[in-house]
Image (cartoon, rainbow, N blue to C red):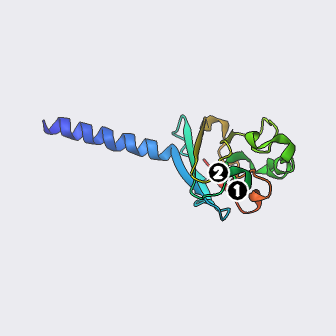
Amino acid sequence: MNKLIIAVTTLFLFGSSVASECEITINGNDMMQYDVNTINVSSSCTNFDIKLIHSGKLDKSIMGHNIVIVPTDSFDEIIGMISMDAGIDNGFLPSDDRVIAKTAMIGGGETTSTSFDPAKLEAGKEYTFFCSFPGHYGIMRGKLSI
C-alpha cells in the first residue's frame, strides 16, 4: 500500500511539474500592462500553452489585448506591419510566417489562449511577446526564452 501511495504521489508531482513548465497564465489590464515580463519555456515541453486573461473592464475596440510571439530580430519589422486595415479579428496584423503564436484580441473580462510547439524555438535565440493593439507594444512586451 505504501508503494502505491508513493507511486501515485510521485506521478502527481511529476505531472504537475511538467504541466507548470509547459503553460503560463498572463493577465492584461486597462492600464496597458501584462503581469509578467518574461516567459520561460522548458525544453522538455512538447506543447506550450498561454492563457491570457483581460482583467480590465474596457471593450476590446478601446483597450483590446492579445499576445503575439515573434523572434526578437523580426520585432521591429512586424510591429511596423500593425495596421487598422488588418482588423481587430486579426490582431491588426497581416499573416506572417515569423509569428510563432498569437492569441485572439480580447476585451475586459474575457479570456483567450493559444498553444505552440516549442520545437519552433531555437535555443539561444531571443524572442519577444507583445500586444499588437496599435500602440500597446511600446509598453506591453516582454522576453520569451527556452
Is residue 6 toward the left or the right of residue 30 in the image?
A: left
Residue 86: quarter of image: top right
Asked which secondary structure carries label 2, the reply is loop
Amino acid at circle 2: Gly
Relative vertical location of residue 56 with respect to residue 66 in this rendering, above or below: below
Is residue 92 toward the left or the right of residue 48 in the image?
A: right
Relative vertical location of residue 31 with respect to residue 15 in this rendering, above or below: below
Image coords of residue 68 (percent x, y): 70, 46
Image coords of residue 75 (percent x, y): 79, 50
108 or 14: nearer the viewer: 108
Image coords of residue 71 (percent x, y): 74, 46
Q: Which mark is residue 107?
A: 2
Question: Residue 127, can we see it?
Answer: no
Question: Residue 18, can we see it?
Answer: yes
Image coords of residue 39 (percent x, y): 59, 53
What residue do we see at 71% from left, 52% from top? 131
12 or 34: nearer the viewer: 34
- State which tag comes first along the sequence, 2 or 1: 1
Amino acid at circle 1: Met
Q: Which mark is residue 48?
A: none
For the residues bearing labels 2 and 1, Cβ distance under 8 angstroms: yes
Residue furthest to the left in view is 1
Can you identify the residue that label 1 sits on? 63
